[in-house]
Image (cartoon, coloured by chain):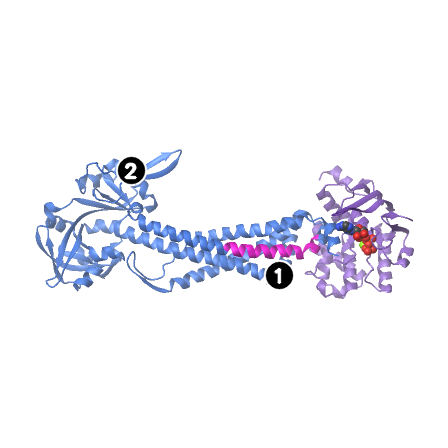
Chain colours: A purple, B blue
């Protein structure tokens, strides 16, 4: 990658989607899931997306996280249009700018909590020492210091959720895409996580896109979208 | 390195299926090596025996020899050998002027030893029993250069023979039949009359036809005994590279104008038997390897299915398709390397144990236990075959793993 491309790959500013369409082809025709979604998530803010089950929130998040490609429409990271990037550039973008928290906390169960968190850092080429340091920092932010060396499958649901958040934050992403990250947490823990995300956003200019069913959290966020049938209605 | 570490963690977290794959490779590798060690062991031993007994090349002009002449055919750089009978062409039995041949042979540095032999038939008579035999008149110094006779002696010594003009070396079966011991006297009947010989040594080649019929006496003694009934000399030659015998035979034949037969031609029947044996064991082993390859393929295909969620997570974190492939290929490599190492150890100890199994064989060679051949090539071959199987068994699932779109998996594994 030469210099100009490197600069090109340093997005700054909001993540925006413009008029996104997405459908799945099935045996009996295509299912339209997204019908022209547009939204913006600004740096340093928490942007929440809420809506009934099946309205297309996860689908939208995967498109924003470059895990899938839209039928049409655009995804911007800052000024950079990313939906049509080549596969390896998308891979790099995910590694450097995006943190993903899945709806069902996906940890690698063969690894310990701290090893899970270190993975994106090691993948970036960071050495073990600084990766460990960063991972420990995040663990203590999330109140999980004592669980660092525990295999992922021996953590409780809520602990796994928090480790997954720590992992998503490990590479200091510009955009954190979180699909119901507080789904498995009690309300005090949920608020704890929300506060952490809010603090990270303010401190680092991280832009958090939060899919949630939790009305209270949605209300607390800086910007709130409501989706229905593949459209943003508010 | 990161991919290797992940692969390692995945392997040790899946002890049972990995153990099964490993067992398949270990079994395949050791089975392959052990069977090869046996079949090639017997073959090699057989070749050693015949080279040690009758040499790599024989120069003779026997009209009644089964096989015809050998001719090297060279087209487009391909070397082949054509066998065809030269019946009809005029032959003198035996070598006419041995000294001329001997001089001509000096020009060939690849010859290790040249032994002139006078062959003839006669009868051994102990006074109680008689037995017809084939006598071989030799110059002992020359013959030791072109044969393994020294090592074939089981009673008496070569010294006994060399110091006694009337000494005789008997085939082991002859001495048994006639009840002769070292130092016993025996008469040779036929030819120009009677000859009184003293038993200097007894040899056993393992080839029963020879142990039953052959005796060695001194060349001069044989010549005077056979007189004009001598069929002329035969030359037995040992060479550096026995593999090159057929080519050398062709060369010698045309330059000496005598009939030259290589050991490969002479022993073709037995060599073909060994080839068939090796081939059939190769088929059996291949089937076994194929089965363990399939088992391994299965394990890895299931592994990929089990791991799809992890693949999606890794991809979402910025692992590329290549990284994902690498993780699976490393898992295969870890199992492969462990399998080859353990398999080779098993193979070596198996080969050793088999070589200890008592087994008495006489007839085409002589041994009291299984003959095995320690050959590094067998291990290399086994490793190559295991590599191919593992490569296929992991490559296909790894490619499939790399191709999966992350969003699709995440949705489908909800
Ligand atoms: N592979 C697929 N093939 C066909 N339809 C699909 C596929 N994946 C998702 N869908 C459909 O797309 C719609 C949107 O799914 P999505 O997962 O985005 O919903 P969601 O808003 O995240 O719901 P939830 O709140 O329950 O997580 C659903 O109706 C779903 O059935
Ligand atoms: Mg969802």
- Give the quarter of the image for residue B177: bottom left
User: Is B381 situated left or right of A227 in this image?
Assistant: left
Residues at marks 1 and 2 on the same chain: yes
Vertical arrangement, residue B66 with respect to residue B204, above or below: above
Residue A178 is at least partly visible in this image = no
Most common secondary structure along the magenta stretch: helix
Q: Position of residue B91 (x, y in %)?
A: 19, 39
Viewer-proximal residue, A75 or B277?
B277
The residue positioned 36% from the left and 59% from the top of the image is B371
Residue reaching furthest top?
B76
Contact check, label 1 and label 2, Cβ < 8 Å: no
Q: What residue sits right under mark 2 in the picture?
A: B251
Q: Position of residue A229 (x, y in %)?
A: 86, 49
Q: Is residue A126 left or right of residue B393?
A: right
Which quarter of the rendered picture does the N terminus of chain A lie within?
A: top right
Q: CA distance from mark 1 to mark 2?
A: 62 Å
Q: Residues within 10 Å of mark 2 (few under 14, many from 20)?
A: some
Q: Is residue A216 above or below residue B262?
A: below
Residue B278 position (above or below residue A13)? below
On whether ligand 2 comes within 8 Å of the CB at mark 1, the answer is: no
Left or right? Give the position of A169 relative to B219.
right
Task: Give the labeled residue for mark 1.
Answer: B12
**Residues shaded magenta:** B289-311
Question: Can you give x and y, in whole percent of width and height, for residue B204 in the image?
Answer: 25, 58
B308 within the magenta span: yes
Whichever of callouts 1 and 2 sits on the residue coming sooner in the sequence is: 1
The chain containing the residue under callout 2 comes to B
């Amino acid at each position: 990658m030469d210099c100009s491309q490197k600069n090109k790959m340093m997005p700054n500013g909001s993540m925006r989607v413009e008029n996104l369409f997405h459908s799945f082809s099935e045996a009996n025709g295509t299912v339209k899931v997204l019908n022209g979604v547009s939204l913006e998530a600004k740096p340093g803010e928490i942007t929440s997306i809420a809506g009934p089950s099946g309205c297309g929130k996860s689908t939208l998040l995967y498109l924003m996280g470059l895990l899938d490609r839209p039928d049409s429409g655009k995804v911007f990271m800052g000024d950079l249009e990313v939906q049509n990037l080549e596969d390896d550039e998308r891979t790099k973008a995910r590694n450097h700018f995006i943190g993903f928290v899945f709806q069902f906390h996906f940890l690698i169960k063969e690894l310990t909590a701290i090893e899970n968190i270190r993975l994106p850092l090691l993948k970036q080429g960071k050495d073990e020492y600084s990766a460990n340091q960063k991972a420990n920092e995040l663990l203590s932010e999330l109140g999980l210091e004592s669980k660092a060396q525990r295999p992922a499958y021996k953590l409780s649901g809520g602990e796994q959720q928090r480790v997954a958040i720590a992992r998503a934050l490990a590479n200091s992403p510009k955009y954190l895409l979180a699909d119901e990250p507080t789904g498995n947490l009690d309300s005090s823990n949920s608020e704890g996580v929300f506060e952490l995300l809010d603090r990270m956003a303010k401190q680092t200019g991280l832009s958090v896109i939060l899919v949630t069913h939790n009305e209270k959290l949605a209300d607390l966020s800086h910007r709130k979208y409501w989706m229905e049938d593949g459209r943003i209605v508010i | 390195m990161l991919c290797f570490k992940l692969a390692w963690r995945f392997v040790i977290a899946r002890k049972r299926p990995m153990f099964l794959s490993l067992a398949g490779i270990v079994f395949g590798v050791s089975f392959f090596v052990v069977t090869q060690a046996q079949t090639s062991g017997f073959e090699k031993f057989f070749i050693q025996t015949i080279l040690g007994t009758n040499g790599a090349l024989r120069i003779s002009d026997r009209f009644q020899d089964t096989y015809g002449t050998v001719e090297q055919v060279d087209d487009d750089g391909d070397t082949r050998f054509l066998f065809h009978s030269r019946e009809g062409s005029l032959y003198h039995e035996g070598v006419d002027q041995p000294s001329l041949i001997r001089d001509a042979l000096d020009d060939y540095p690849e010859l290790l030893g040249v032994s002139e032999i006078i062959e003839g038939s006669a009868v051994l008579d102990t006074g109680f029993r008689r037995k017809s035999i084939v006598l071989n008149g030799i110059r002992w110094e020359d013959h030791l250069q072109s044969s393994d006779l020294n090592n074939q002696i089981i009673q008496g010594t070569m010294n006994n023979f060399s110091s006694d003009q009337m000494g005789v070396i008997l085939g082991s079966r002859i001495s048994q039949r006639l009840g002769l011991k070292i130092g016993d006297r025996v008469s040779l009947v036929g030819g120009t009359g009677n000859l009184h010989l003293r038993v200097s040594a007894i040899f056993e080649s393992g080839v029963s036809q020879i142990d039953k019929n052959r005796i060695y006496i001194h060349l001069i003694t044989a010549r005077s005994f056979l007189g004009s009934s001598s069929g002329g000399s035969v030359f037995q030659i040992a060479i550096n590279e026995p593999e090159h015998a057929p080519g050398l035979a062709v060369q010698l034949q045309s330059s000496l104008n005598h009939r030259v037969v290589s050991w490969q031609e002479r022993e073709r029947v037995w060599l073909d038997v060994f080839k068939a044996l090796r081939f059939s064991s190769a088929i059996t082993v291949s089937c076994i390897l194929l089965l363990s390859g399939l088992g391994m393929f299965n394990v890895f295909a299931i592994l990929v299915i089990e791991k799809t969620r992890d693949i999606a997570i890794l991809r979402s974190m910025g692992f590329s398709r290549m990284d994902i492939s690498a993780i699976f290929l490393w898992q295969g490599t870890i199992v492969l390397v462990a399998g080859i190492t353990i398999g080779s150890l098993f193979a070596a100890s198996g080969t050793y144990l088999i070589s200890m199994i008592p087994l008495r064989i006489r007839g085409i060679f002589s041994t009291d236990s299984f003959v095995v051949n320690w050959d590094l090539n067998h291990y290399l071959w086994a490793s190559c075959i295991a590599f191919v199987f593992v490569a296929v068994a992991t490559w296909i699932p790894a490619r499939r793993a790399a191709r999966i779109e992350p969003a699709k998996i995440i949705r489908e594994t909800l």
